């Protein structure tokens, strides 16, 4: 199994600021995925983070708003830029296990924007 | 990936079996059925997956109909800690590609003492 550490676990931010969320995995993984979960809703995929190339964003999400870095095979960051209250959500990173069919998730970052 | 239909919510008495249904009538031959659950304030947790045969592990059993158009996740002896949102997802095997899981709304299971 893959152990995923996400930081921060929660934060309260002011409108117009940016927050960078870190995702650290205890093993090398090819793909990392970033999801958003708005209050009371299911998970929505933001983007797929590839090591050594630009992330692939889903419809409705853009790089200027959610820039992603993937400097190596165990680490990724997601930045939520120029935040507004509508960005208040849980943000989760996910990775695929290297030898099995499972996807593993971090515990998430609870973001509240005032 | 094929879409799934699940009941919005279900209740189950503690100690009884919880049977969570999922319809996936448009599933393709190479698509698996995955089940994940999300306990409040945590990230989703893998439970089980299968292609066409029934599967069992330490957490649950997965029963897939012969035509593969529906399946049932069974928690044999539900406990209060099984209270969570359960997601049924169909997609090609993860080792067949790097596409992520697409989550529907899931079933909110409440285990009652």
Image (tube, rainbow, N blue to C red):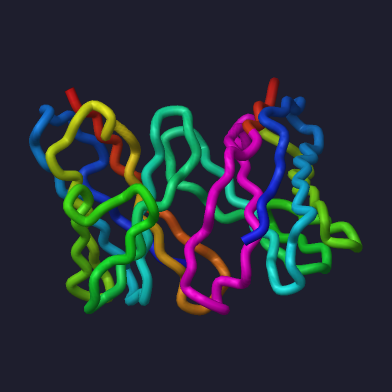
Tell me if residue A80 comes above or below residue A41 in the rendering.
below
Residue B92: in magenta span: yes
Q: Nearer the viewer, residue A15 or B61?
A: A15
Tally of numbered discs? 0
| Quarter assignment of residue B86 | top right
Lateral position of residue A103 relative to residue B50, left or right: left
Magenta-highlighted residues: B80-107
| Quarter assignment of residue B84 | top right
Task: Give the residue at x 75% y 46%.
Answer: B22
Q: Nearer the viewer, residue A28 or A86?
A: A86
Q: Residue furthest front?
A: A59
Residue B48 in view, yes or no: no
Q: Position of residue A43 (x, y in %)?
A: 46, 44
Task: Give the residue at x 79% y 48%.
Answer: B72
Lateral position of residue B96 relative to residue B68, left or right: left
Q: Position of residue A91 (x, y in %)?
A: 32, 44
Residue B19: in magenta span: no
Q: Position of residue A90 (x, y in %)?
A: 34, 38
Residue A92 in view, yes or no: yes
Tell me if residue A82 comes above or below residue A50 in the rendering.
above
Tell me if residue A31 comes above or below residue B58 in the rendering.
below
Task: Give the residue at x 88% y 57%.
Answer: B65
- Quadrant of the snapshot with the C terminus of chain A: top left
Lateral position of residue B103 relative to residue B70, left or right: left
| Quarter assignment of residue A34 | bottom left
Lateral position of residue B99 relative to residue A16, left or right: right
């Amino acid at each position: 199994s893959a152990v995923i550490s996400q930081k921060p676990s929660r934060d309260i931010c002011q409108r117009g600021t940016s927050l960078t969320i870190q995702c650290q995995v205890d093993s090398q993984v090819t793909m990392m995925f970033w999801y958003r979960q708005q209050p009371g809703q299911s998970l929505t995929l933001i983007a797929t983070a590839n090591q050594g190339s630009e992330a692939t964003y889903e419809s409705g999400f853009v790089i200027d708003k959610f820039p992603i870095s993937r400097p190596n095979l165990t680490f990724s960051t997601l930045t939520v830029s120029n935040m507004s209250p509508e960005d208040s959500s849980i943000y989760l990173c996910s990775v695929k296990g290297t030898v099995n069919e499972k996807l593993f998730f971090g515990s998430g970052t609870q973001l509240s924007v005032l | 990936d094929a879409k799934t239909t699940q009941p919005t919510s279900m209740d189950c008495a503690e100690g009884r079996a919880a049977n969570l249904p999922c319809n996936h009538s448009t599933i393709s031959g190479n698509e698996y059925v995955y089940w994940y659950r999300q306990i409040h304030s945590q990230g989703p947790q893998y439970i089980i997956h299968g292609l066409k045969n029934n599967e069992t592990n330490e957490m649950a059993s997965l029963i897939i109909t012969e035509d593969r158009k529906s399946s049932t996740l069974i928690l044999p002896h539900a406990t209060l800690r099984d209270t969570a949102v359960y997601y049924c997802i169909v997609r090609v095997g993860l080792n067949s590609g790097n596409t992520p899981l697409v989550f529907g709304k899931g079933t909110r299971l409440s285990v009652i003492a």
